[in-house]
Amino acid sequence: MKSSIIKLTLVSIAENCMQLKGMVGAADVVKPADKVEFYSPQVKETPIYTISDDIGSPDSTFTMSSINSSGDVKSPGDPPEKKFAESDPEKQPLSGKKEERWWTTLMQIAVPFFIAGCGTIGSGLVLGSVKNWEVFLQVKAIFVLVPSLSGLKGNLDMCLASRLSTQANLGNMRLPREVISMVVGNISLVQVQAIVAATVVSMFAVVVNTITDRQFNGSYVLLLIASAVFTATTTCFVLDFVMVIVIFASQKFKVNPDNVATPLAASIGDIVSNSVLAVTAAYMFEQIKISLWQPIALLCVYYSLLPIWVFIGWKNKYTKAVLTTGWTPVISALFISGVGGIVLDQAVDQYPGYEVFQPIVNGIGGNLVCVQSSRLATHLHQTAIPGILPENTRIIEWPWRTLFYGTPAAKIARMLLILAVCGQIVFMIVADVVFRGFVSLQFVFGVTYVLCSVIQVMVLLYLSYILIHFMWKKKKDPDNAAIPYLTALGDLLGSVFLGLAFLILSIFGMEYGNNVQ
């Protein structure tokens, strides 16, 4: 009798395992490349299995309770799944374990947004004051570097902020040992990407400068590469530590890091990047007149450190996958930002004041779209599994549904558009007063400026919705791949739209500063 009961129990366990296997297979979770492990039934806890894919780490574990009715993976400790009416999709929380109040979300986004706006104003004023320095007049290719090096905060530091914010929201930043490993690995990864990316974009600037000036100067090549590498690595190193502090502070004060981390990264990113680039380039310009040993020595030091950073990133489980597969978005984004740099190089001599407002338009657009993309990525990590979108979610939606009403993302998009309008009005006036010493803006210029910046933000928010859901469907982590493209497109679209605005205003004789006597 006893043996028959044991036999019946074993048969029941086997049948349950077969049913579970069929259920997981139907949900398209397990594929030949995936790995599922079932642990001993003698353990009284909920059975655990592991899933390996392009996004998740092989060490990731989920309990049986983390599978919802549609086959999506939920984070351990999440509340029971809720059913939302299709007629009101905005009630679905976009980020976090419970829905945030709209005023809480708005305040968490608005405060760092306006702090970041001060950084973009400072960046524009720095660029406006240094454009007449000898190095900027003699080596015009430096203007090509400006958007790309400023965009590195989106390619690298904002990706870092988005990755750490997602891990914080998933509850994976609690054990000190794991946190230290995660931070060290990510910092080493960013240093590798910064050195390689700065070298690539400086070579792009050299090619553009050679084509436009129809001459090649070897000493200027060393100046550009040394200045770009030093600027990228220094800026990223500073911002990385700022990001870690911000995310830990967000956890302590119960603030969603998706709302504050990326804007605060940008708040000092632009101004630090432009300031370091200007000072370094001016110093190197004076040194190459005497000898070339200083830029050569600087490059030797950084390229000698590169294998060390690669080794640390390769041995770290949090960054190994990104180190080997995350280069396409970074390099592609650099070339997109480089095209925006060509627009800046051509417009800065034709339209006075363009260099003051261009960093503001680009920075604000990039900051806002990074907030949205970071929240969308966290939402997908919490409610879906790689390759499967949440219920009633499509990759391509109508712009109205993604920007105003009809999807969970529309609620945040409306707030970001309101912040874009209000913020650009404030930043435009402040930048004008600081740059000119008094208010010199005309009404037509103000309307045109705000209109072009809002159109840029609308395009970026719509593209972010499509791009992030497309990457998730293709089992690519949006935290690593989406933000570089979006910030680079923000630089390109902002430069082009602002250039068109200055061009149209100049045709009608209403360009910036024409009323200044």
Image (spheres, rainbow, N blue to C red):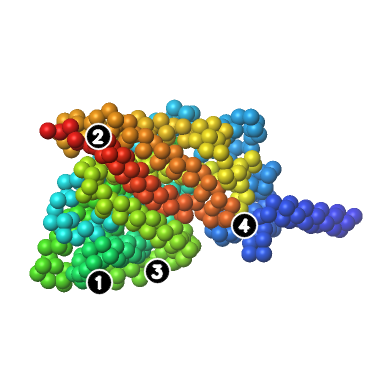
> Label 4 sits on what residue type?
Thr
| Marks 3 and 2, how far apart at CA | 56 Å
As helix, strand or loop, the secondary structure at mark 1 comes to: helix
Which quadrant of the rendered structure holds the C terminus?
A: top left
Q: Position of residue 237 (x, y in %)?
A: 30, 55
| Marks 2 and 4, how far apart at CA | 63 Å
Q: Position of residue 42 (x, y in %)?
A: 71, 55
Viewer-side label of 2, 1: 2
Viewer-side label of 2, 4: 2
**Label annotation for residue 510:** 2
Q: Position of residue 350 (x, y in %)?
A: 22, 47
Residue at image mark 4? 50
**Compared with residue 382, is residue 325 higher up or lower down, i.e. above or below?**
below
- Dividing the picture into quadrants, the one containing residue 57 is bottom right
Q: Earlier in the sequence, mark 3 or mark 1?
A: 1
Which quadrant of the rendered structure holds the N terminus?
A: bottom right
- At a point 20% along the width and 43% down the height, the residue shown is 352
Labelled pair 4, 1 in contact (Cβ < 8 Å): no
Q: Earlier in the sequence, mark 3 or mark 4?
A: 4
